[in-house]
Amino acid sequence: APPSVKAVGVSGTAREGDLLLCGGDVDGQNPRLAFQWLRAAPDGTGVEDIAGATDSSYTLRAADVGRRVLCRVTATDGGGSGAATSGLDAGPFAGGAVVTAASAASGPAMPIASCPSAVATLSSRATLLLRSYRRSALTLSGRLAASPGGAALGGAELDVVQTVTRSGASRQTKVATVRAGADGAFAVKVAAGPSRTLQLVLAGCGAVSPRIAERVRGAVQATTTTRRVRNKQAARFRGKVLGGYVGRGLPLELQVKVGASWKDVKAMTSDARGRFAVSYRFLRTYVRYTYRFRVVSRAASSWPFLAARSSQVAVRVN
């Protein structure tokens, strides 16, 4: 008999730049799994395959904004093939939701009033950045003047204000200060941080630069103290979600690599410091085999990062 695929689901956040995960219940004789992501209009029409999107995870793109995304799982073994597709309202698309644009999600809820008597012209015109956690530090440089191309405002002090949105609430914090030179030139380094918006503010006047939205991929570390076990024994994994802002805990998933795809095997949450621990027991491995595991973060509105995944951790059984 061919394998059976049931209850295909999608998890994550329906927002450009975020990661979606696909999984389902599969019965069969050690079947090989294949994934295909699809996009559709909000009413379910115009379903089309997304070229190259054949992993168990998928990062939403600009082409997905205003659309819904589905996942098809195909299982193949000696008895044939079986397939199933997630529902139109699966996971983050419940209630008619569609993919939202990154810029809409990253803008501050409390905008800073513009300064009418000064303007900072930035060296880089990029206002939407996608970076990894370890490379989220950036340098803001440019020239401060009374107007675009006008007289320099030498010696003026600028603050860099960061806005971070969590669970729909925004918090603004001063993260750096720089004084413009005699010619109005300035350069200031901003430390690594979460997904945020940054703006240059002239003391006593207001914002002098456009908002720079930085979308930051999270970071997860995972390791094991049991790299070699026998059948009926358990491998233990532990690690940490980096970057802070975890709060009461973040949804995480332990995954194992099956062929070219990844399969969810155990759900967990981190503690308030981002730490986690989980075990997985092997029950049907009768020959020597090396499994590869990883830990994936689930998107959460309280965690201001894009979804993340750890490096692979190898465990040899028998």
Image (cartoon, rainbow, N blue to C red):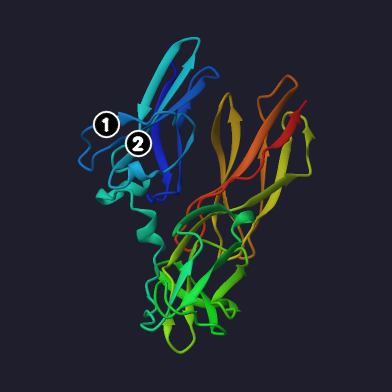
The residue lying toward the viewer, choosing from 37 and 172, is: 172
SS label for mark 2: strand
Which residue corresponds to mark 2? 70
Tell how many labels: 2
The residue lying toward the viewer, choosing from 245 and 148, is: 148
Using the numbered discs, state the Cα–Cα distance from disc 1 to disc 2 in whole angstroms.
Answer: 9 Å
Q: Which quadrant is home to the C terminus? A: top right
Earlier sequence position, callout 1 versus callout 2:
1
The residue lying toward the viewer, choosing from 88 and 80, is: 88
Q: Is residue 35 visible?
A: yes
The residue lying toward the viewer, choosing from 214 and 83, is: 214
**Residue 224, position as x, y percentages in the image:** 75, 43
- Identify whether 61 is placed above or below 104: above
What amino acid does circle 1 point to? Answer: Val
Q: Which quadrant is home to the N terminus? A: top left
Q: Could you tell whether 122 is left or right of 221 in the image?
A: left
Residue at (55% x, 67% y) in the render? 141
Q: Is residue 247 visible?
A: no
Query: Which numbered marker is on residue 147?
Result: none
**Residue 20, position as x, y percentages in the image:** 44, 43
Which residue corresponds to mark 1? 47
Tell me the mark number nearer the camera, choosing from 1 and 2.
Answer: 1
Which quarter of the figure has residue 125? Answer: bottom left
Label 1 crowd bin: few (<14), some (14–19), many (20+), radius 10 Å: few
Which quarter of the figure has residue 67? Answer: top left
Q: Could you tell whether 295 is left or right of 4 in the image?
A: right
Find out whether the residues at labels 1 and 2 contact each other: C-beta distance under 8 Å: yes
- Identify whether 47 is placed above or below 30: below
Residue at (52% x, 19% y) in the render? 31
Residue at (50% x, 59% y) in the render? 124
**Residue 69, position as x, y percentages in the image:** 34, 39
